[in-house]
Image (cartoon, rainbow, N blue to C red):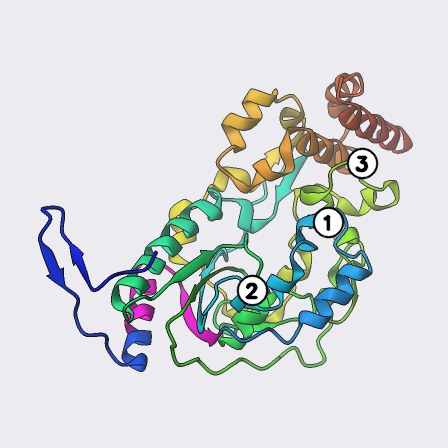
Amino acid sequence: MACGEGTADPCGIERSRPAAPDAAALREQIRRRAMELGFDECRFTTADPPARGAWLERWLAEGRHGQMQWMARRVERRTDPRKVLPGAASIVVVAASYAVDGPEGISAGAPVGVVARYARATDYHEWMGERLRSLAMFIEEVGPRGTQTRWYVDTGPLLERELAERAGVGFVGKHTNLISRRWGNWLLLGEVLTTCTLPPDPPERNRCGHCTRCLEACPTRAIVAPFELDARLCISYLTIELRGPIPVELRPAIGNRIFGCDDCLAVCPWNRFAHAGRLMRQFARPDLGAMELAGLLELDEAGFRARFGQTPLARARYSGFRRNVCVALGNVGGPDCRPALEKAAQDPDPLVAEHARWALARLAERGQ
């Protein structure tokens, strides 16, 4: 949406458009507005093509994206932001921290399932999207006449981690996630592309050094080399994006994770600087941190939607979520979980039934 020469108030009175500030002042005006909206970081880079475009094409050619076919569509847009928004000159990169202040409380007693930290909240696509839309409208209002924008939050054809690195928000670590010296690696990213020309912030340099903790922590060895991830082995992919059975040989390594995995992130030494962000505090769902597994398996589809429909967990879908719960029960469950698994083994959904039978076999191996 581009602004014209003037804007009208609700009464229909035409108001003259104020003179546009110089580029540096405009950038700081946008940054202040982003902070007012609750973002923890706001930085700027150019709309030049990312340097990792060739790497992405090779990664896709090797099939490391698994079933995420959306990543292979219109690759030319991912490798050139100016094909996403014609005339794009600058990109505003914002970040929201989802770090947790203090130790995490994982209840003892009945076997529980663990959810990745970013998903223990109302779906960030919603609340970040609302604020990015507001920021984009603000840029069109205060920018030069004819300013255009387009915003994304983890949904558009952008190599957002490289853009964030280029804007100085952080650097891409060996686990392929963004690491900030201020926030650790617990960051959600969003972008506004604009035809405004705004002075870029200095890029961040890589600061991983010789550290390999993230590679060593990965339960499935999905980080096949520094800065190289095979998504087909990643627990986040297996429990969220994969539609179909989880490979049998990888199921034991999933442990009690039922949506995503934080292991490579949690060991990063830069997390000593991490602290919870303002927006995540507002939208947090502490009830999603550790949930009793057997009860989750007994949820019907309506109950699943009621409990998780406004959270990232909905992305796994009802069938995939119950599949994940079966795997977790097979790994950490005890005799008390057997009735729920026996019922699931007769489920009309063949995906759930097969994973429940696998879990029962695991219990039997442990004499349970």
The tag on residue 235 is: 1
> Closer to the N terminus: mark 3 or mark 1?
1
At x 52% / y 70%, what residue is drawn? 164
For mark 3, what is the residue? 245
Direction right: furthest residue: 365
Q: Is residue 36 left or right of residue 311?
A: left
Viewer-closest of 177 and 114: 177
> Closer to the N terminus: mark 2 or mark 1?
2
- Quadrant housing the N terminus: bottom left
Q: Residues within 10 Å of mark 3 (few under 14, many from 20)?
A: some
- Residue 244: x and y in percent read 77, 36
**Residue 36 appears in view:** no
Q: Is residue 356 left or right of residue 124?
A: right
Q: Is residue 121 above or below residue 272?
A: above
**Residue 240 appears in view:** yes
Task: Using the numbered discs, state the Cα–Cα distance from disc 2 to disc 1 in whole angstroms.
Answer: 21 Å
Residues drawn in magenta: 29-46
For mark 2, what is the residue? 160
Q: Is residue 42 magenta?
A: yes
Given this view, does label 2 or label 1 mark the residue nearer the observer? 2
Given this view, does label 3 or label 1 mark the residue nearer the observer? 3
Q: Is residue 346 above or below residue 247?
A: above
Task: Using the numbered discs, state the Cα–Cα distance from disc 2 to disc 3 in whole angstroms.
Answer: 30 Å
Viewer-closest of 184 and 228: 228
Q: Is residue 251 magenta?
A: no
Q: Is residue 21 left or right of residue 14?
A: right
Task: Using the numbered discs, state the Cα–Cα distance from disc 3 to disc 1 in whole angstroms.
Answer: 13 Å
Q: Residues within 10 Å of mark 2 (few under 14, many from 20)?
A: many
